Amino acid sequence: MSEALTERIADDMRGGLRVAGLVILGAVHFGLALPALLANLGHYRQPWLQFAAFGVLTLVMAVDVRLGARGRG
């Protein structure tokens, strides 16, 4: 294989892995962590702090999605 083809395949694989990782992260974040947070809200002394941490993680994930959509990484 030529060097250019190898590099193109590697770039495509990295992009696919990034998308797969973000899909898995989104499923865990919103499918598992959010319901657990809401179900156990009464056990926290300061629930706003839990929501703030969840919001920061959501923001980080959104920035990563946006950078990925623009082709940066």
Image (spheres, rainbow, N blue to C red):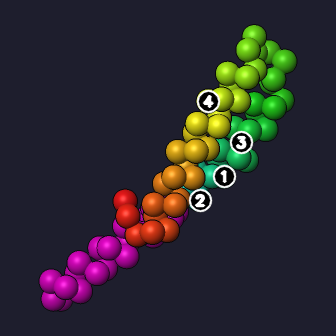
Disc assigned to residue 27 = 1
Distance between the alpha carbons at the discs numbered 1 and 4: 17 Å
Q: Which residue is mark 4?
A: 53
Q: Residues within 10 Å of mark 3 (few under 14, many from 20)?
A: few
Judge whether 16 appears above or below 42 on screen.
below
Report whether 2 appears left or right of 39. Answer: left
The residue furthest left is 3
Label pair 3/4, CB-CB below 8 angstroms: no
Distance between the alpha carbons at the discs numbered 4 and 2: 20 Å
Q: Secondary structure at mark 1?
A: helix
Label pair 3/1, CB-CB below 8 angstroms: yes
Q: Secondary structure at mark 2?
A: helix
Q: Which residue is mark 3?
A: 32
Q: Disc 1 marks which amino acid?
A: Ala
Q: Residue at x 57, y 39 (%)?
A: 57
Judge whether 19 appears above or below 34 on screen.
below
Residue 16, percent from left and from top: 45, 70
Disc assigned to residue 23 = 2
Q: Quadrant location of residue 55?
A: top right
Q: Residue at x 53, y 59 (%)?
A: 65
Q: Residues within 10 Å of mark 2 (few under 14, many from 20)?
A: few
Q: Which part of the image, by quadrant, shows the C terminus?
A: bottom left
Distance between the alpha carbons at the discs numbered 3 and 4: 15 Å
Report whether 73 appears left or right of 36. Answer: left
